[in-house]
Amino acid sequence: MIFYVIKNYAKLMCRSFMNVLLLIVTPIILIAVLSSAFSSLMASYEDAGEFRAGYRVSSENIMTPYIGELREKAEENGVSFIEYTEGDAEELIRRDDLAGFVDFTGDTYVIIKSSARENEGKILEYMMTSFERNIESGVLAFQSGSQIPDVSLSVSHPEHMPDINATDYYGIVEIVYFLWCGIFCMAGIINNEKKYRIMQKLRVAGLSETKIYLSKFIPTVAVVAGGTGIAALLSSLMFDIHWGNIALSALIVFMMVLASIGMGLMFYSITDNIVLTIVFSFGIIWMAGFFGGSFETYLFSSHPQYLKELSPIYYGNRALVELSSAGRSDYCIPSITISGVMAVVCSSAGILAGSIRKRGKA
């Protein structure tokens, strides 16, 4: 009986072909747009090695108590700071072959970057941003006249990711983002389910809540996984996207499909309303994508690391991008584990919600 229901649900989904087509076409369009728009940014992401930067600090600058520690931490990360008391910053950059210059004046600082050494300039800017965030509490204490607390800086530049470019990056992360939206492909099933009272008929036929859940879960996973595979194949052929370890990448993607469909069906089992299901799912997926690198690459984003690690999309994106660029990733197992746990927990919650709803209508 359950196989017959699964087959019919799969037919209903295929008849709602427009939803499946959007799952395939939309990421390809975004890959084309974003990879072109951010190609220069990602192309400049390469190992800069050690370099020198200049700085000048006035005696009244609120950063003065921390300059020594900044220089020490900078040295640990391959950046040598040289102090200048006079001279034009741009002229000093050209004369002494500096990557940039930091001018501390009053309660602000200005970064002047070398136009010929763009990558080192980005690292210097990142380092100063980290410096500013780490000493914020100390600066506030200094301004209020109280004792300046000890501040332990942790300044570093982003870990080098070899051979990553905008086409590979967005060619992977947009496929991931839209597979998480795969529950939208179920709209056709749910509309027909409501129209023809299919759920009531299945319960009268004696199917358990677990079998009813699986009759939706299995065909939805199959269709979304198939659509995702087609989108990945077409985009790879069109834009020459490199996926690294194909078998491991496919496993990571498939586990995320299980998690995304499990989450969507859980919301539907709880609300019994497709509109609320889409609203809840899209809200969570958008936030997870925002912090997980779907819109702004996680390599350059300034979001705190703990916010990134709250997003299951971040683990999938990072695992797949690192497999593509480096051939390995420490995020593969966490991504697979998190997706698997999500699939099991959400499916269990969905079945439980369906059972409670059934008893309430009995």
Image (spheres, rainbow, N blue to C red):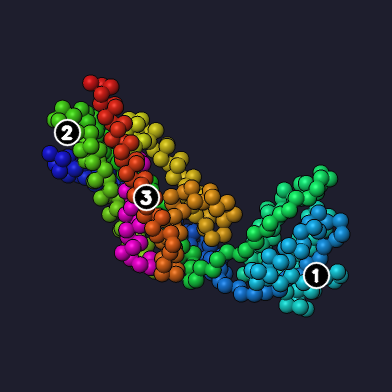
Question: Are the two marked residues, 3 and 2, in contact with CB atoms closer than 8 angstroms?
Answer: no
Q: Nearer the viewer, residue 40 or 314?
A: 314
Q: Nearer the viewer, residue 187 or 110?
A: 110
Give the label on residue 83, or none: 1
Q: CA distance from mark 2 to mark 1?
A: 77 Å
User: Does 180 appear above or below 65?
Assistant: above
Give the label on residue 98, or none: none
User: Does 281 appear above or below 225?
Assistant: above
Question: Are the two marked residues, 2 and 1, in contact with CB atoms closer than 8 angstroms?
Answer: no
Residue at left offset 64%, top offset 59%? 154
Q: Nearer the viewer, residue 264 or 322?
A: 322
In the rendered image, which residue does mark 2 sit on? 207
Q: Report helix, strand or loop for mark 2.
A: loop
Say what amino acid the circle numbered 1 marks. Answer: Glu
In the rendered image, residue 75, in percent from the top left (x then y), is placed at 68, 70
What is the span of residues highlighted in magenta in the rendered image?
241-265
Say what amino acid the circle numbered 2 marks. Answer: Leu
Q: Is residue 133 shown left or right of residue 185?
A: right
Q: Report helix, strand or loop for mark 3.
A: helix
